[in-house]
Amino acid sequence: MTNKFPLYFLVILFVSAIAAGCNTDSEPVVYEGDYGNCSVTSFSLTKDDSVLTGLDSVFFSIDLLNGEIFNADSLPKGTDVSKLVLKIGTNSASGCDLTYRLPGTDRDTTISYIKSPEDSINFADGPVKLVITSYDGQSKRQYSVKVNVHDVEPDTLYWDQMARRTLPGNISSPTAQKTVEFNGEAVCLTASASGASVAMTNDPYAGEWRIASANLPAEAIVNSFTASSDAFYILDSYHNLYTSSDALAWTATGEKIDYIYGGYGNEILGARRDADGWKHVTYPASTVVDVPSGCPVEGAGQIMVYETKWSVAPMAMFVGGKDAAGNLVGSAWCYDGNVWAKISNTDIDERENVALFPYFTPRVNTSSWRVTERSVLIAVGGAYEETVGEVVSKSVYVSYDMGLNWDVADSYLQLPEYIPGFANAQALVFDTTLSSRSMADEWKSFPSRRLPAWMFKVASPEGSRVTVAPTEWECPYIYLFGGEDAAGHLYDTLWRGVITRLTFQPLY
């Protein structure tokens, strides 16, 4: 660290010399508001690949007001921070002293950074005290320096066991369920031999559902329940199509459809077996086209509709299912309003009734430690066949190119042991506003942490100052409804999952 003497310091030195003649106390005076003489202008760690690649690129925030220096985006779990060499910049300080706990002892030690800038510092036993003394020796400023390390794997898709709930509704022991999204709300239909109910909410996190009894058509197939942008639909066991404006009272349409894929705008997409073969149909429009070879006509995965820059119309997509020949497939199929086509080059393993949802995962640049967002599609669950018969799966597949190629997800995205294999579940994603002021709720919220740098732009172009921290932020939670075991029995469960990093309080 180089000591320099700008003009204003010479003036201060002159004034201080005069004042010193009138001051009988020889101890330095601590001026709480005197940040200029005792400010830390920069702070970083020295490169050490044996500790962590890119260690010298870790960003540290300097809070002059509160006297805190910290890395808001914590280092990976397990990083050894017991021997770190620092780079500290100041405004020509005469003293720069660091006090820390000696590793493996209960004793503290203090070193002078000015005299020993290459000495390593132990951050493993808590914050380090940094005291900056002004050049004239008349003022001091104390800082608390923290090197934060994650105590959990931040990029893990976490399903909190304490957050598990039963399916919403007024049916005590449902035997069937189907959940769809309708105009920004989750709509959960549950049924048993005693009746049916519909539960709706735009905030599953809060758990405040509007529940009412439903009068379903006779022999209604609950798993066919779906929604377009303006109506609900369901089939009975005779393939008759019914519609409803509220999912409670139903009216026959007079149309027959063998299988419903899901909604597409104000229409629904389906398959019908005519005398001359399987046809793709829509309702209420009467589009009828031949089903392409290999396209599922039953057991298709959960349908999702999205927009891309390559298509002028929204795309409806599902993964997996059973084709007209009765074969299970693992391919992804799309519909753009006119044409059905297989879009996947590499598929998931062959299965049916797969849950599909869009999400994103963090991608860390280990040279700069910047975290960026990577959009993904996630396919989970489903039933498949082996020599021992039909079984259910809990394996997770991901696609990073909107369904063109699929791979088995890394371990941090796979389901935990306590969630059993399933088929016929639905996964919906809803944003929830989290607050650092009130993180405790009936779902047992995660500990308050901080979001990665890509979530919020640092206000200062210098990258060394901080402003008021956001106290609220949007967090996308995944809600997994129901599912069935290998025997077709319903799981009366509602799980909530999230990438752990997204629950962390945003950066300053």
Image (spheres, rainbow, N blue to C red):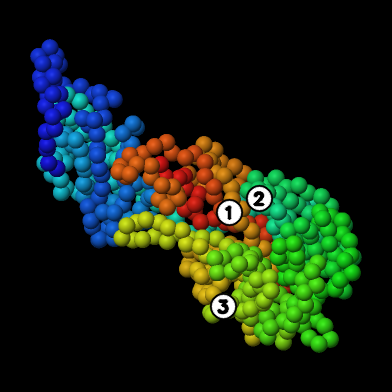
Q: Which residue is mark 3?
A: 344
Q: Secondary structure at mark 2?
A: loop
Judge left or right: residue 136 versus residue 155: left
Looking at the rendered structure, the kind of residue marked 2 is Pro
Q: Earlier in the sequence, mark 3 or mark 1?
A: 3
At which x and y percent is residue 77? 38, 55
| Residue 450 seen in the figure | no
Q: Which residue is mark 1?
A: 477
- Of tags 3 and 1, the one toward the viewer is 3
Quadrant for residue 9, please give it.
Answer: top left
Q: Residues within 10 Å of mark 1 (few under 14, many from 20)?
A: many
At which x and y percent is residue 198? 78, 54
Q: Which residue is mark 2?
A: 204
Looking at the rendered structure, the kind of residue marked 3 is Ser
Q: Residues within 10 Å of mark 2 (few under 14, many from 20)?
A: many
Q: Earlier in the sequence, mark 3 or mark 2?
A: 2
Q: Kindly indicate whether the residue at mark 1 contacts the one at mark 2 (C-beta within 8 angstroms).
A: yes
- Quarter holding the N terminus is top left
Q: Nearer the viewer, residue 331 or 149?
A: 331
At which x and y percent is residue 479? 63, 57
At which x and y percent is residue 105? 25, 44
Quadrant for residue 127, please give it.
Answer: top left
